[in-house]
Amino acid sequence: MAGKSEFAVVAEGDAPGGARWQVMAGGTAEDYLHSWKVIQPDGTWDGTGVGGPALPSDGRLADVYSGIKNFGRPDQEPLRVHVRADPRVRRLHLVSRDGDECDALPVADDNEVGVTLFFVATTWMARLRSVQCFDADGRPLEPLRF
C-alpha cells in the first residue's frame, strides 16, 4: 500500500490492576511509528515505541516486540507485547517461558498502510517463548520463536 496515516491513538483498553493502555501509530509503509503506554490508576505510566518499516522486509508475517521492565529485580513489571503484522494475521497465540498462554486479537488495523496492530498487557513475569499467527479462518500461519 502506498498510503500514509497520521500518528494518533488508534486503540485503548483496560489493563490488569485497574490500569489503562493506549496504542498510538501512524506513518507510511517505509517509515512507521507504533508505540504503547500503560497508565496506572495513580497517573504513572510506562511504555515504548518502535519505528521503521511497517512490516518485515524478510517475508515474515509479523514483528513482535516485547519486554519486561526491570527484569529480575524486585521492582520488575509484567510482560508487555506489541506486534505489527500483515493484515492476514487475525489472531495470535502467545506462550511465555513459564508456560502461561493467551490469545490476542487485533487492537487496530491501519488500512492506509496495510498493517495490523496487536497489544497485550500481561500479568506474566516471564519472557515470550513463542507466538503463533492465525488467519481469519483459524488456520495457523507461521510460528515465531524467541
Image (spheres, helix red, strand yellow):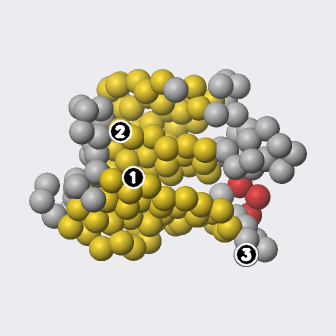
The kind of residue tagged 2 is Ala
Measured along the vertical axis of the image, is residue 76 above or below residue 17? above
For residue 85, what is the image quadrant?
A: top left
In this view of the protein, which residue sits in the foreground, 73 or 140? 73
Which residue corresponds to the image point at 16% horizontal and 64% vertical from the top-left? 3
Q: Is residue 5 left or right of residue 123?
A: left
Work out how far the residue at label 3 is from the one at label 1, CA to CA, in angstroms.
Answer: 25 Å
Work out how far the residue at label 2 is from the one at label 1, CA to CA, in angstroms.
Answer: 10 Å
Residue 141 in picture, x, y percent from top left: 32, 26
Which residue corresponds to the image point at 52% horizontal and 37% vertical from the top-left? 103
| Callout 3: SS | loop
In this view of the protein, which residue sits in the foreground, 117 or 26? 26
Q: Circle 1 is placed at which residue position?
A: 117
Q: Circle 3 is placed at which residue position?
A: 43
Residue 106 in picture, x, y percent from top left: 41, 50
For residue 64, what is the image quadrant?
A: top left
For marks 3 and 2 on the same chain, the one whose residue lies earlier in the sequence: 3
Crowding at dot 3, Cα within 10 Å, few <14 / some 14-19 / many 20+, comes out as few
| Pointer 3 with pointer 2, Cβ within 8 A | no
For marks 2 and 1 on the same chain, the one whose residue lies earlier in the sequence: 2
The kind of residue tagged 1 is Leu
Which residue corresponds to the image point at 33% horizontal and 66% vertical from the top-left? 26
Q: Circle 2 is placed at which residue position?
A: 62
In this view of the protein, which residue sits in the foreground, 55 or 104? 55
